[in-house]
Amino acid sequence: MPIVTAIAIYFILWWVCLFLVLPWGVRAQHESGAVVRGSEPGAPAKSRMKRKALQTTILAAIVWLVIVVVVQYHLVTLDSIPFLPDFVPDDV
């Protein structure tokens, strides 16, 4: 896998994982009893974005490593997916 492709895959995975990690452990202002006047009661009391960025980086790295291993060692190929059409012409 070329390095540019690997970096691009990691970048996309990082953003997808961020949206997975954002709701982890969030307590709304109305749940903690500290509603700031003029804000939405459902807004997070503490966002903890540094912690979420670290969690996202770790999760994305794990998923990225799995993808790299699958691609490098050809563990899953297009031929191994049964519902895909045959991509090789008959005359070859």
Image (cartoon, rainbow, N blue to C red):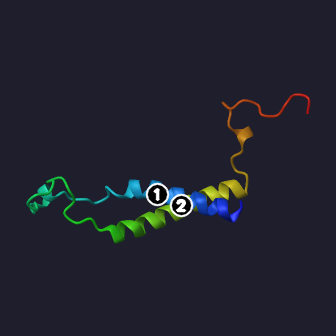
Residue that appears at 74% across and 38% down: 79
Query: In this orientation, which residue lies closer to the viewer: 58 or 12?
Result: 12
Per the image, label 2 sits on a secondary structure element best described as helix
Determine which quarter of the picture holds residue 37. Answer: bottom left
Please state the horizontal and vertical placement of residue 77, each as a whole percent of the image. Answer: 72, 45
Structural crowding at the residue carrying mark 2, measured as other residues with C-alpha within 10 Å and reported as few (<14), some (14–19) or many (≥20): some
Please identify the quadrant where the C terminus is shown.
Answer: top right
Looking at the rendered structure, the number of numbered marks drawn on it comes to 2
Q: Which residue is mark 1?
A: 15
Q: Are marks 2 and 1 in contact (CB under 8 Å)?
A: yes
Q: Amino acid at mark 1?
A: Trp
Structural crowding at the residue carrying mark 1, measured as other residues with C-alpha within 10 Å and reported as few (<14), some (14–19) or many (≥20): some
**Residue 68: which disc?**
none
Determine which quarter of the picture holds residue 23. Answer: bottom left
Q: Residue furthest front?
A: 38
Q: Residue furthest right?
A: 91
Q: Amino acid at mark 2?
A: Phe
Residue that appears at 68% across and 32% down: 84
Please state the horizontal and vertical placement of residue 5, each as a whole percent of the image. Answer: 65, 59
For residue 88, side relative to residue 72 (left or right): right
Residue that appears at 14% across and 57% down: 39
Query: In this orientation, which residue lies closer to the viewer: 23 or 9?
Result: 9
Please identify the quadrant where the N terminus is shown.
Answer: bottom right
Please state the horizontal and vertical placement of residue 61, each as a whole percent of the image. Answer: 53, 64
Please state the horizontal and vertical placement of residue 52, each as a whole percent of the image. Answer: 36, 65
Q: CA distance from mark 2 to mark 1?
A: 7 Å
Per the image, label 1 sits on a secondary structure element best described as helix
For residue 5, side relative to residue 29 (left or right): right
Query: In this orientation, which residue lies closer to the viewer: 27 or 9?
Result: 9
Q: Which residue is mark 2?
A: 11
